[in-house]
């Protein structure tokens, strides 16, 4: 057996079940497919009159957002509540860390309160893995976005969306457009697409926004939008972080839109039935034109709907993995 | 059949059931009575040992407060929880709109998460109606106060209180005292009282705080408190917005209290069994003296109690209307 | 019968059951033992897969924190949720009091919403008792820390911890180390230890941080750490409030640690099986060294675990006392 890197063994039980969800990197194809299949069962819950299943009843889920994100926190809070969990939102800026308490002391305290799961967002890459290494057994850690490293539940909801519309990954050409350099979402998407067997993953953007070593991840790089979009089945626009626009990396929003912004005309090289995705929130007229965002091929809001189901899947699988581990 | 104005048809299903609650204006008398009768059933829930009914179990209610109001948000949150709903509080100031997302994009995202109801407070008149026009079917919108326009659940809890103490609206004289100009509460109260058949609605206040065209709403205007209160059955004090006291409209709080503040002596022209109401929070010694606020005729805290029941009624009726519409 | 002081009768029903929990002072030994025995039943709930009991189902618990404390609020919120209550967190700074509403008007409003319990944290000593005196019957008030006066649930979780590890209070020597002057925790601990029959309670600290009249509470005072720790069974370190370090009372953190900080060497005079406690959050290297905080004798995180159970016990006992009182 080949030795697996730390984060792979860290997030799996001895018999290969998910117990934390930190990264899609190093996950097996069958595990990712398990997540997608489990999520499929939860999509239906959102359509029910009573959107509630008792899987996490009596469990305590703690949202630990070191970096503010109302949108992402809301999706995890909803997913947890639909699983019947009790949810605590800890606003880190206002809490004990301001009294000089260390991160680990805070976590140990939350564990001592019999928490079952930490959903962690942090501006430092690796913070959720660090936490997962140090929590007591029985506490699951889910990465809700860490630095430039990973955003695995976002990537999995994107995979769910692609599979929903394209039924398969084999033979698919997928283009990721925009600020790949700063995007934890892109990194997780690339890993997931390659693991799930997509034919080709392309990244498209100005050279200043593409990491130099990106081809090591198994992608082809394009700086020309038209060439990059040729015959693709899926187009994923990344969000342009406006706070980075002042830097030397890019001249202006309008300049970006002129070269890489998606409008109907510029999407012509893609396949006629290509779907258009975006992790949201969208900047209309910057990375995507309204005619595309509101058009027939956009599946952006379906990504949001599937996102609740995917988070319910990951949360319930991690709790099941922890419970199984505890019995072993 | 006479054409109904937009907001009337907007908040009703084809067969006349409530599906949003945006305004009491244009509502039929029988619909308002339905709300009061439904609320009567919920008043009893607040007295139970287990204050919980399963009507909204598995539903997601989102409090969208664009204007901060802990008190009003709390009453809706409690009403939703007693109906067994899951509640999300979105602090707009801190959320996605600050990332440049448009209002509609934010709403579409919340809809995509399978939200069932938006409770909307906004400083712009018409914002809840705008949202109701644009949400997908199956999402109910409740106006929790918009600009100077309306505060329909507050008006309905006031109607509930009046009916509770006076058993009827016929033959009742009701006086509304204070800053009518800036009051969405007064506007909704006037509409509701006229629809429900009150004999006479009076507004009393300095000319600078009475809208010039107010008599078009079917009220008599008094600038003299003593004349205005003569023989009334109900006195409603409005809250004086302190932040408006610096403007040219009024000289000072003490000047207002001298002319329009309610004390026992000044209430003498009203009927001996007149009830005294106030939407809260009260400014003691400004619009109302403590001897009145804490006196036997004040029903201010009962308004609060009935308010939970009225909000439970409106929420459950809107969800029922949406569900019925979805089946049609 | 001997007349009991106000706070004693205030928090008990006529037949001696808890209806508020404001202070351990004046509580009988049997009542404190009742709390510990009730808590013992709840400790097991935290170990269950479904950490939920229905005792407070349909009850409304309002966290009224006039002084921010994420940690303490979180423990009460969790305890209430595990009892199946609905929880409202009122952020006082942002709420109605900023609109000029008086404290009592705000409380009356919350009562009118059929709240069942107020959990009150306040910087003024006596605020929770004042509130308990003025609430309507059926509303329980729990003191979650008031000024320098009391922190009774913290003291009771400390008693639970001591009894858990030492099985009894008889014959125990307990040392409380640090800033006793500013500590509501110390005051409540001293009362509880004496009521429960500890053999000796010692306070250890610099004279500037020991109240001059402390011996009236039934403690022996030591300024020398080594003498104070001699043969003790339990060592309780108090948290040093860093915000008070700038005052004239103490020279510096390092000076405090040099004289009173607990490390393994300095703990040698204590019994070999002495347990080390701290209310948290700990300041490593100020009042306690990491070798002690993370060592075998430290039971600091167990205090946290027991704290949830003790709060569940107090909450359910107060609600039961209120319900019984309501039926009388």
Image (cartoon, coloured by chain):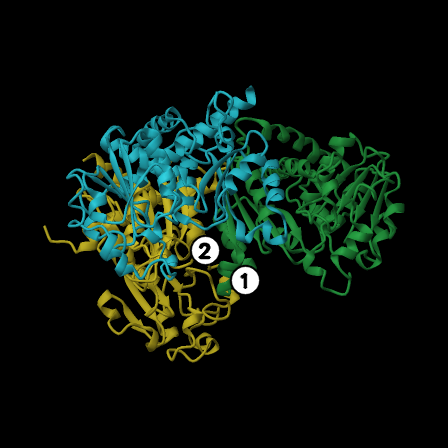
Chain colours: A cyan, B yellow, C green
Q: Nearer the viewer, mark 1 or mark 2?
A: 2
- Which of the two residues, A227 or A301, is positioned nearer the viewer here? A227
- Image coordinates of residue A23 in percent, x first then y, are 44, 36
Q: Quick check: B104 above or below B318?
A: below
- Which of the two residues, C15 or B275, is positioned nearer the viewer here? C15
- Which of the two residues, A298 or B247, is positioned nearer the viewer here? A298
Give the crowd class for mark 2: few <14, some 14-19, many >=20 residues within 10 Å: some
Quadrant hosting residue C275: top right
* Whether residue A309 is visible: no
Chain label for disc 2: B
State the quadrant of the C terminus of chain B: top left
- Image coordinates of residue A111 in percent, x first then y, are 59, 36
Chain label for disc 1: C
- Image coordinates of residue C125 in percent, x first then y, are 68, 56
Q: Residue furthest left?
A: B1
Residue found 35% across the figure and 47% down from its top = A180
Distance from Cα at disc 1 to Cα at disc 2: 15 Å
Residue found 72% across the figure and 35% down from its top = C161
Q: Quick check: C17 above or below C48?
A: below
Left or right: where C52 falls relative to B198: right
Quadrant hosting residue A110: top right
Q: Which mark is residue C102?
A: 1
Residue found 24% across the figure and 36% down from its top = A173
Name the residue that disc number 2 marks: B70
- Image coordinates of residue A275 in percent, x first then y, are 22, 39
- Same chain, labels 1 and 2: no
- Which of the two residues, A27 or B320, is positioned nearer the viewer here? A27
Give the crowd class for mark 1: few <14, some 14-19, many >=20 residues within 10 Å: some
Left or right: where B131 falls relative to B258: left
**Label 2 element class:** helix
* Whether residue C47 is visible: yes
């Amino acid at each position: 057996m080949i030795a697996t890197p730390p984060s792979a063994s860290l997030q799996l039980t001895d018999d290969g079940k998910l117990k934390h969800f930190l990264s899609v990197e190093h996950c097996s194809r069958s595990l990712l497919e398990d997540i997608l299949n489990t999520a499929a069962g939860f999509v239906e819950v959102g359509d029910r009159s009573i959107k509630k299943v008792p899987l996490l009843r009596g469990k305590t889920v703690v949202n630990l957002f070191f970096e503010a994100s109302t949108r992402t926190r809301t999706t995890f809070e909803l997913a947890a509540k639909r699983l019947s969990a009790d949810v605590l939102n800890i606003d880190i800026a206002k809490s004990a860390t301001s009294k000089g308490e260390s991160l680990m002391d805070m976590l140990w305290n939350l564990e001592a309160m019999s928490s079952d799961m930490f959903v962690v967002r942090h501006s430092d890459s690796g913070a959720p893995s660090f936490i997962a290494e140090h929590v007591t057994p029985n506490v699951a850690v889910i990465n809700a976005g860490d630095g430039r490293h990973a955003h695995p539940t976002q990537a999995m909801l994107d995979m769910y969306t692609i599979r929903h519309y394209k039924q398969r990954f084999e033979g698919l050409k997928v283009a990721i457009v925009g600020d790949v350099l700063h995007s934890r979402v892109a990194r997780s998407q690339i890993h997931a697409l390659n693991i799930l067997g997509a034919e080709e993953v392309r990244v498209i953007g100005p050279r200043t926004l593409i990491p130099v070593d990106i081809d090591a991840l198994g992608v082809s790089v394009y700086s020309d939008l038209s060439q990059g979009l040729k015959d693709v089945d899926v187009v994923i626009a990344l969000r342009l972080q406006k706070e980075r626009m002042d830097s030397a990396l890019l001249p202006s929003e309008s300049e970006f839109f002129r070269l890489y912004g998606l409008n109907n005309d510029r999407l012509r090289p893609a396949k006629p039935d290509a779907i258009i995705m975006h992790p949201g929130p969208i900047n209309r007229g910057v990375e995507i034109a309204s005619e595309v965002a509101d058009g027939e091929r956009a599946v952006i809001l379906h990504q949001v709907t599937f996102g609740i189901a995917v988070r319910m899947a990951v949360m319930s699988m991690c709790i099941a993995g922890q419970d199984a581990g505890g019995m072993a």
